[in-house]
Image (cartoon, rainbow, N blue to C red):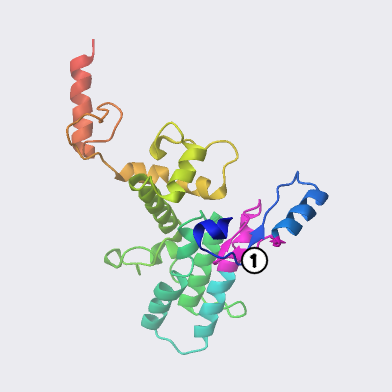
């Protein structure tokens, strides 16, 4: 029926099914036999993304660390200058997690390990040969104008990518993923007013954690003023808004 209506042919080799914990073995066998697909195993991936997010987030995203480590080790044997190591750190090590970070909030421990790997590559350290790190990563990631190297803070970059996804959902609510999230998490309000909810998906939890960053940076563009809540919405720049609030407080206080 699907193939006849859509004109698309299902690839059963790439199709999988996921069962909840309460599905019995007999029901699983019957469904698998009817659909002709296989049951997905734990931590399997599709298009580079995990199909199931369990409790152990570190185990699920461990592949990112291994991928970054292998890439840097491949360059490590070559005699690279500091400029070459800077380019590799920016173009390879910091770019590899970007796709995953645009959808998931990576664990803090994993981000610290990624920073450690990039720092060891920068200073020439390895698991066997530990060289002295003259500067901490916190100083290396500062802008060059402030004496640092301008390397990315992956935690801040992770939140920025997630906030960008929220902005896309806010400005394009008619998209498929936007309609799915709205039906599940914020039926009667906007995505900016949505709550985390009880036991949500890890993608929604990741996006929701970046909502504060988005709220700090957005403002209403004043049109006819019909939909602006003067008291609740951020429609003035920060300094003017604070002064406006002070003036209102003086006028309304007893």
Q: Secondary structure at mark 1?
A: loop
Provide the residue designation for mark 1: 12
Q: Is residue 47 magenta?
A: yes
Where is 112 relative to 182, above or below? below
Asked whether 105 or 129 is in front, the reply is 105
Q: Position of residue 142 (x, y in %)?
A: 35, 63
Between residues 31 and 233, which one lies in front from this camera angle?
Answer: 31
Q: Is residue 171 visible?
A: yes
State the extent of the magenta-drawn residues as a range.
36-64
Left or right, residue 50 beside residue 223: right
Quarter of the picture holding the C terminus: top left
- Residue at 23% across / 14% down in the picture? 253
245 left or right, relative to 168? left
The residue at 29%/63% (across/down) is 146
Residue 216 in which image quadrant: top left
In front of the other: 55 or 119: 55
- Residue drawn at x 46%, y 48% as measured from the top left: 207
Q: Is residue 192 left or right of residue 118?
A: left
Q: Residue 234: horizontal and vertical position, in percent? A: 27, 35
Camera-side residue of 6 and 105? 6
For the image shown, how many numbered marks are present on the structure? 1
**The N terminus sits in image quarter:** bottom right
In which quarter of the view is residue 113 placed? Answer: bottom right
Confirm whether the magenta stretch covers residue 27. Answer: no
Taking the spot 37% from the left edge, 53% from the top edge, the residue there is 164
């Amino acid at each position: 029926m699907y193939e006849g209506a859509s004109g698309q042919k299902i690839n059963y080799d790439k199709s999988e099914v996921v069962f909840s914990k309460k599905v019995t073995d007999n029901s699983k066998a019957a469904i698998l036999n009817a659909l002709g697909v296989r049951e997905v195993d734990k931590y399997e991936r599709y298009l580079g993304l995990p199909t199931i997010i369990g409790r152990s987030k570190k185990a699920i995203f461990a592949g990112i660390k291994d991928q970054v480590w292998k890439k840097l080790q491949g360059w490590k044997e070559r005699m690279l200058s500091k400029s070459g190591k800077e380019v590799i750190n920016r173009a390879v090590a910091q770019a590899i997690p970007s796709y995953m970070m645009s959808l998931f909030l990576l664990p803090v421990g994993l981000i610290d390990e990624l920073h450690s790997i990039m720092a060891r590559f920068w200073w020439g350290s390895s698991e066997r040969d530990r060289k002295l790190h003259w500067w901490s990563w916190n100083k290396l990631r500062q802008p060059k104008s402030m004496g640092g190297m301008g390397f990315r803070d992956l935690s801040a970059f992770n939140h920025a990518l997630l906030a960008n996804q929220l902005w896309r959902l806010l400005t394009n609510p008619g998209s498929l993923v936007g309609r799915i999230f709205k039906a599940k998490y914020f039926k009667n309000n906007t995505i900016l007013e949505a709550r985390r909810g009880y036991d949500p998906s890890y993608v929604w939890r990741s996006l929701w954690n970046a909502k504060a960053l988005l709220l700090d940076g957005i403002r209403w563009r004043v049109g006819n003023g019909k939909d602006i809540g003067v008291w609740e919405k951020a429609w003035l720049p920060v300094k003017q808004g604070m002064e406006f609030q002070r003036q209102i407080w003086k006028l309304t206080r007893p």
